[in-house]
Image (tube, rainbow, N blue to C red):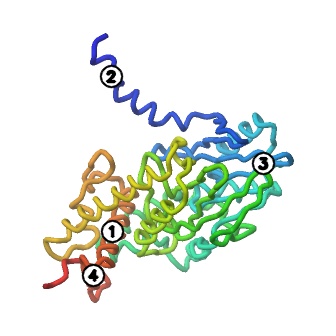
């Protein structure tokens, strides 16, 4: 056979990269099932809900987004496993982002399932309330002027206003239970331990099943993409420092199967954690190089480094991706300050610039 045709084409490679988003139920063994639910837009495409089957009900890790299509897909999938929505006992949510949390809140209005969320997310819930009441803007917009990007803040305000209908329809209310770090969840068939892994959001938790050597990782460790850090309703300038600490924490646990919220199940959590740690060290070097020529804002540094796995220019990203990119850059600059490799200076107008320490 011709060697050219035997190689997978770009579109085939793309197809296999997205194979995990195909509707259905994946049996992972031991009564655990992966159920991908749809998301709008084609950046993340889908979110995995994990169902843990029990004799008198089913427990879910993450719930998906409050969308009609997602609710239908979940109903169908649970039906295949012999359950109805009324059989959901618990929604164990890894973090407050809408694609993980909001379907649980919507279903709770008609069903009896109990929702738990890491207690570190209280501050984000409070920030959401403040935004709803008009007391604050979303943290990721409010922080942009200090990062040297007031014009982008204006553009993103416009974008958020354009999607206001969708955001208003999402219900944000407290979980039934805030989980403390280390909480043991006894599901009869197994015991999960909630481990606080701040970084992606302040109160992110992963659920560790030590006996089954499985980690329900939420967005903390993703197989194909690097999770955003600190993109959340409350401002968090130390998100990357916390995230790197939460990654290293995973290496102190025995290695386990990785059950991520976006992407396929993988055999080794440690292998991916090591890749993510190496990725951030490279980004820290690139960010340091971008700041070495003189004082830079997070915006200027973001413009100097390549983005996404396609190495795109900052100027070619859409506004929401630019917000993520500036936030990432600021988070890396702050880690370089903590490490003593850069110093930060705040102007009287409140704009932060970074440069090498003198001498
Ligand atoms: Zn998330």
Q: The N terminus lies in which quarter of the figure?
A: top left
Task: In this rendered view, identify the residue nearer to me: 199 or 182.
Answer: 182
Q: Using the numbered discs, state the Cα–Cα distance from disc 2 to disc 4 in whole angstroms.
A: 49 Å
| Mark with earlier residue (1, 2) | 2
Query: Residue placed at 36% from the left, 24% from the top?
Result: 8
Which is nearer the N-term, disc 2 or disc 4?
2
Q: Quadrant of residue 319?
A: bottom left
In-front residue for pair 316/219 = 219
Provide the residue designation for mark 1: 332
**Residue drawn at x 23%, y 62% as measured from the top left:** 286
Local SS, label 1? helix
Looking at the figure, which quarter contains the C terminus? bottom left
Question: Residue 291, relative to residue 80: is it above or below?
Answer: below
Q: Position of residue 330 (x, y in %)?
A: 33, 70
Label 3 sits on a secondary structure element that is: strand
Q: From the image, tell me which residue sits under label 3.
A: 58
Which residue lies under the disc numbered 2? 7
Cβ atoms under marks 1 and 2 closer than 8 Å: no
Residue at point 54% right, 46% down?
40
Residue 196, image x and y in percent? 58, 68
User: Residue 15's x, y, as percent?
Assistant: 45, 31
**Tag 2 and tag 4, C-beta contact below 8 Å:** no
Q: Nearer the viewer, residue 165 or 86?
A: 86
Count how many numbered circles sit on residues in the image.
Answer: 4
Rendered location of residue 122, percent (x, y):
62, 74
Q: Nearer the viewer, mark 2 or mark 4?
A: 2
Q: From mark 4 to mark 1, how far is it between C-alphas?
A: 12 Å
What residue is pinned by disc 4?
344
With 291 as the anchor, is 19 left or right in this view?
right
Q: Is residue 316 left or right of residue 100?
A: left
- Mark closest to the chain's N terminus, 3 or 4: 3
Label 1 vs 3, first from the N-terminus:
3
């Amino acid at each position: 056979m011709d060697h050219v045709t035997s190689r997978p084409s770009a579109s085939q490679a793309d197809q296999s990269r997205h194979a995990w988003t195909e509707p259905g139920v994946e049996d992972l063994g031991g009564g655990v099932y992966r159920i991908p639910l749809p998301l709008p837009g084609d950046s993340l495409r889908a979110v995995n809900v994990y169902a843990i089957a029990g004799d008198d009900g089913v427990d879910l890790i993450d719930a998906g987004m409050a969308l009609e299509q997602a609710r239908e897909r979940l109903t169908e999938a649970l039906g295949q496993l012999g359950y109805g929505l009324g059989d959901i006992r618990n929604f164990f949510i890894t973090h407050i982002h809408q694609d993980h949390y909001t379907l649980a809140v919507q279903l709770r209005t008609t069903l009896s399932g109990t929702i738990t969320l890491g207690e570190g997310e209280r501050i984000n819930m409070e920030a959401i309330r403040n935004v709803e009441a008009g007391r604050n803007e979303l943290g990721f917009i409010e922080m942009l002027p200090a990062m040297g990007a007031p014009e982008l803040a204006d553009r993103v305000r416009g974008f958020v206003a354009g999607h206001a209908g969708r955001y208003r329809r999402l219900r944000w209310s407290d979980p039934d239970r805030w989980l403390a770090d280390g909480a043991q969840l006894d599901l009869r068939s197994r015991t999960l331990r909630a481990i606080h892994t701040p970084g992606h959001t302040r109160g992110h938790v992963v659920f560790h099943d030590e006996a089954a050597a499985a980690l329900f990782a939420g967005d903390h460790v993703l197989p194909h993409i690097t999770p955003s850090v600190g993109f959340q309703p409350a401002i968090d300038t130390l998100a990357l420092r916390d995230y790197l600490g939460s990654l290293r924490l995973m290496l102190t646990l025995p290695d386990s199967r990785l059950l991520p919220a976006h992407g396929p199940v993988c055999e080794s959590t440690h292998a991916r954690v090591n890749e993510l740690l190496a990725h951030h060290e490279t980004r820290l070097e690139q960010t340091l190089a971008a700041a070495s020529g003189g004082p830079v804002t997070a915006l200027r540094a973001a413009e100097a480094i390549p983005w996404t796995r396609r190495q795109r220019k900052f100027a070619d990203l859409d506004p929401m991706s630019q917000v993520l990119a500036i936030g990432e850059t600021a988070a890396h600059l702050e880690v370089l300050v903590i490490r003593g490799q850069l110093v930060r200076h705040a102007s009287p107008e409140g704009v932060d610039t970074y440069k090498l320490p003198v001498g």
